[in-house]
Amino acid sequence: MPVLAAISAGGVVGAVTRYGVGLAWPHRPGGFPWSTWLVNVTGCLLIGVLLVLITRRRPDQRLIRPFWGIGVLGGYTTFSTASVDVLRVAPGTGLAYLGLTVIGALLAVWAGTAATEAVLRR
C-alpha cells in the first residue's frame, strides 16, 4: 500500500503541474502544441537526472522511484497527448512535431544524465 500511495500522490503532483503548464501556455487549435512538447522534453530531462541520482547515490529506493519516476514524471509527461496532437495538426506540422518530440526527448534524457553526472563528479 505505501508504494501505491506514493505513485498516486506523485501522479497528482505531475498531472496538476502538466495541467498548469497547459493553462499558462495554451496553443491555438491546429497550431504547434508547444506546451505539450515542453512538458515531454522537460520530463525526459528530469528522468535523466533521476536515473543518475538513483543509480549513483543509491538512496532508499522503496518510495523514491515510485513517487518521482512513476508518479510525478509519469503524470507530468504526456506522450499520449502528443500522439493525438500529431493527428490534430496539418500533416507537415504533425511530422515536424513528431520528429522534434522524439529528438528533443532523447537529447533531454542525455542532457539530464550528463549534467547530473558532471555535477556529482565535482
Image (cartoon, rainbow, N blue to C red):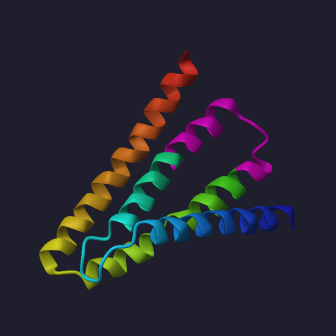
Q: Is residue 51 left or right of residue 79?
A: right
The residue positioned farthest toward the left in the image shown: 92
Where residue 82 appears, x then y in whole percent? Answer: 37, 73
Residue 6 placement, left or right of 87: right
In the picture, measured across the screen, residue 70 lies left or right of residue 30, that is right
Q: Nearer the viewer, residue 3 or 108?
A: 108
Q: Residue furthest top?
A: 122
Residue at (67%, 63%) from the top-left corner?
13
Which percent across, then down, holds residue 59? 75, 37
Q: Residue at x 40, y 40 (%)?
A: 110
Stretch of the chain drawn in magenta: 47-64
| Residue located at (57% from left, 23% from top) | 120
| Residue 43 spot, x, y in % from top left | 49, 55
Name the image quarter holding the C terminus.
Answer: top right
62 versus 101 height, above or below: above
Classify 35 as above or below 46: below
